[in-house]
Image (cartoon, grey):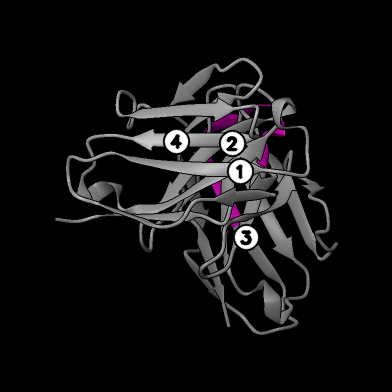
Amino acid sequence: EIVLTQSPGTLSLSPGERATLSCRASQGVGSSSFAWYQQKPGQAPRLLMYDASSRATGIPDRFTGRGSGTDFTLTISRLEPEDFAVYYCQQYGSSGLTFGGGTKVEF
Amino acid sequence: QLVQSGAEVRKPGASVKVSCKASGYSFISYGITWVRQAPGQGLEWLGWISVNSGNTKYAQKVQGRVSMTTDTSTSMAYMELRSLSSDDTAVYYCARFYDYPWDYFDYWGQGTLVTVSS
C-alpha cells in the first residue's frame, strides 16, 4: 500500500498570501494518478485537482497542482476567505488507492 | 447529484445499511465508491462497486463485513456494514468515479453519520 504523507499538518496564513501544500508518496505513483480535495467543516470533500495538474470543473485558476513520481504539491496563489479548509491528497495508481492525512489551512 | 440516507444509531454487533440516490447522470456509466471519516480524522476508502457489472472491490480492513450493491432501476447504491463496533462510528460518503479499478472521485454525497454505541 502506498502511504501518503502530507505536510505541513497545519498552515497558518492570511487572505492574499500564497499557500503551498505538499504530499509525499512512499513509492512512485504511476501515470500522475493523483488528486487533491478540499473539505470544509460539516461538508463532503470537493474535488479540486486530478491527474496531478488538471483542475476539476469550476475550480478557479488560483489552484495549481504539480508533481510526479513521489512528490506532489498544491499551490493556492492568493488565498481567498473561502479557501480556509482542510486539504487531502489521494493517489489512484495501479497499486491501489490511498488518502493522505490532510493539511489544515487556517487563518 | 448523490443524496444519502439519514443518520443512524446502532448498538455494537448490529448492522447498518446506508443508501445513496444518484440523479442527473447515466447511473450505469460510472462506479460508486464508499469512503468514511471518523470524527476528527481523515478519509478512509472502503470499497467500490461497478454499477454496470456488479463487480466489487473492498478494502482489506472491512473485507468480510461490508457489502456494496446497486439497484439500476432506481439509481440507488447501498453499503451494508455488519458486526459494528465503536471503531465504525464515522460519516460515510458515497462518491462517483469513472475509471476502473482506481480513479478519483468527482461528485460526493452529503454524508451519513453512523454512530455505534451501547
Residue nearest the viewer, comparing B73 with A44 = B73
The amino acid on which the numbered mark 1 sits, given as a three-letter code, is Lys
Q: Amino acid at mark 3?
A: Gln
**Secondary structure beneath label 2:** strand
SS under mark 3: strand
**Residue A35 placement (x, y as % from top left):** 66, 44
Mark 3 crowd level (few <14, some 14–19, many ≥20, 10 Å Cα):
many
- Disc 2 to disc 1: CB gap under 8 Å: yes
Nearer the N terminus, badge 2 or badge 1? 1
Q: Are marks 2 and 3 in contact (CB under 8 Å)?
A: no
Q: Position of residue A67 (x, y in %)?
A: 70, 44
**Is B15 a magenta residue?**
no
Q: Which residue is mark 4?
A: B79
Question: Gap between marks 2 and 4, in whole Å?
Answer: 10 Å
Query: Which-is-in-front pick, marks 2 and 4?
Result: 2
- Given the current orientation, which residue lies at the most extreme left position? B118
Is the residue B115 above or below the residue A69 in the image? below
Q: Label 4: few (<14), some or many (≥20) within 10 Å? A: many
Question: Are labels 4 and 1 on one chain?
Answer: yes
Picture quarter with the C terminus of chain B: bottom left
Q: Quadrant of residue A86?
A: bottom right
Asked if the residue at tag 4 contacts the one at tag 3, i.e. Cβ–Cβ closer than 8 Å, the answer is: no
Image label count: 4
| Disc marking residue B21 | 1
Q: The residue marked by circle 4 belongs to what chain? A: B
What is the magenta segment's predominant secondary structure?
strand
Instruction: Give yes or no for residue A25 being in the magenta stretch.
Output: yes
Which residue is drawn at the image coordinates 67% and 69% (left, top)?
A19
